[in-house]
């Protein structure tokens, strides 16, 4: 254990823009961002738009090249941290959103059980937008089991989509149910990691609570970390023609109108959090980095040349916004009152330099949590604790809705594969030619 008292967790969220990652570049920037070159015990990747929609909806081996590059990046980052070895615990995707969890090799035996779930909030409840959840049981040295819930999410886009984003959050809480996951041994090699929905977690053990009722995002004994492209903007309307003149500039002073802190005052997520309309009970570390979206094509072309962004070239048709966020659920008040010295510590919250593949910057959070289980409340649940009093109840039809949406995803995935990939177009062409030839043969035989 990196510490006998705390567990170090590194969380990364990145909208991949459906492109393959440059793993060495990503690994170099990631290792530089870690506080004091500290090795995380757990690394969580929240990925959105991980691949083209055809590959995401079909899943399995179609996603393998995309996930393998991230596993290679984690391996390379570990090497840069003094040869740290990370093992992929589980990789899960629902449509275009994925959650990848890795742990230090020496901690793999601490994983006692795994639960997973997912819900789509996109078109017809499909997974072009949605959330994936992973819950781990992590054994401690005093024989307790620390519960950790990680959630990757992608909410509705556009400046005018505020209400839809809040509704997406409600539908995620109501529809994301985590159930025990079958497990098996996997290799540590980055080239042999699991690929999406077909990927399996690390250890061959009996999943926790096989006969228990499934639980949602909020549970009384679990930590909760949410990371994703939450898509909250800094305006409810799109920018006018000359608005780009006021976009944040890197050389602006804090008191200037074009310093990013001025724009941060209009952040929708901060306002909605305070009003209790989204991400209920969650906290966020102070933001001291520029907007993470939307960068221009010119900025992306320059991105592989700069490890530090000296220019901010924004797309003029979107307000620069902090779309990519990481939030967490603080310890219950009862734990903090019993021991004021116990708490969650945020060590770093920042954005990595822009990657050439995307108009979003990756965002990272380095944090430590007390290595002790959250105790069960005796008798009535703790008043005001969102863990015991979730903002929304579980939809009783959650499983049925997911199965229906999954069938739609397969149909859309096949159609997209036939229409948008070279192999698919070739197959479609052969089918059309065979159909035409067959029609003429039948017509000749009958005529």
Image: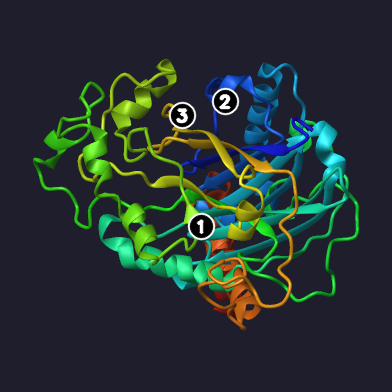
Residue 391 in the image: state x and y as whole percent.
51, 72
Residue 70 in the image: state x and y as whole percent.
63, 35
The label nearer to you, 2 versus 3, is 2
Q: Quadrant of residue 333?
A: bottom right
In-front residue for pair 128/206 = 206
Q: Residue 34, labelled with which disc?
A: 2
Residue 199 in the image: state x and y as whole percent.
75, 50
Q: Residue 352, labelled with which disc?
A: 3
Element class at badge 2: loop
Element class at badge 3: loop
Q: Is there CB contact under 8 Å for labels 3 and 1?
A: no
Badge 2 or badge 1: first in the primary sequence: 2
Task: Residue at 61% x, 73% y: name it.
Answer: 402
The label nearer to you, 2 versus 1, is 2
Mark pair 2, 3: CA separation? 10 Å
Q: Is 94 situated left or right of 257 in this image?
A: right
């Amino acid at each position: 254990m990196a510490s006998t008292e705390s567990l170090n967790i590194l969380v990364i969220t990145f909208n991949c823009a459906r492109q393959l990652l440059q793993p060495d570049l990503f690994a170099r920037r990631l290792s530089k961002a870690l506080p004091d070159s500290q090795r995380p015990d757990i690394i969580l990747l929240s990925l959105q738009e991980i691949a083209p929609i055809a590959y995401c909806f079909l899943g399995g081996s179609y996603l393998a090249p995309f996930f393998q590059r991230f596993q290679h990046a984690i391996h390379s980052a570990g090497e840069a941290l003094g040869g740290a070895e990370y093992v992929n615990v589980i990789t899960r995707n629902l449509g275009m959103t994925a959650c990848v969890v890795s742990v230090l090799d020496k901690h793999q035996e601490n994983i006692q059980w795994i639960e997973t779930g997912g819900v789509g909030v996109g078109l017809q409840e499909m997974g072009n937008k949605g959330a994936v959840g992973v819950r781990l049981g992590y054994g401690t040295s005093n024989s307790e089991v620390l519960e950790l819930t990680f959630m990757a999410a992608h909410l509705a886009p556009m400046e005018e989509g505020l209400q839809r984003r809040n509704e997406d959050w409600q539908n995620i809480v109501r529809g994301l149910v985590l159930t025990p996951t079958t497990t098996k041994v996997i290799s540590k090699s980055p080239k042999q990691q699991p690929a999406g929905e077909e990927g399996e977690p690390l250890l061959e053990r009996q999943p926790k609570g096989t006969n228990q009722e499934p639980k949602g995002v909020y549970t009384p004994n679990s930590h909760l970390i949410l990371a994703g492209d939450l898509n909250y903007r800094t305006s409810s309307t799109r920018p006018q023609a000359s608005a780009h003149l006021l976009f944040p500039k890197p050389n602006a002073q804090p008191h200037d109108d074009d310093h990013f802190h001025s724009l941060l005052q209009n952040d929708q997520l901060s306002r909605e959090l305070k009003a209790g309309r989204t991400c209920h009970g969650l906290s966020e570390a102070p933001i001291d980095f520029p907007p993470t979206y939307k960068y221009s094509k010119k900025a992306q072309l320059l991105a592989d040349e700069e490890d530090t962004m000296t220019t901010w070239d924004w797309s003029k048709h979107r307000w620069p916004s902090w779309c990519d966020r990481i939030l967490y659920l603080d310890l219950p008040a009862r734990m903090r009152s019993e021991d004021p010295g116990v708490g969650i510590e945020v060590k770093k919250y920042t954005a990595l330099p822009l990657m050439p593949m995307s108009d979003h910057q990756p965002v990272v959070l380095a944090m430590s949590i007390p290595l002790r289980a959250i105790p069960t409340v005796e008798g009535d649940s703790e008043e005001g604790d969102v863990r015991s009093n979730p903002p929304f109840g579980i939809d009783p039809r959650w499983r049925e809705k997911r199965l229906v949406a999954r069938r739609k995803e397969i149909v859309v995935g096949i159609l997209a594969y036939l229409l948008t990939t070279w192999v698919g177009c070739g197959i479609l062409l052969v089918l059309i030619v065979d159909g035409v030839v067959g029609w003429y043969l039948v017509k000749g035989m009958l005529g």
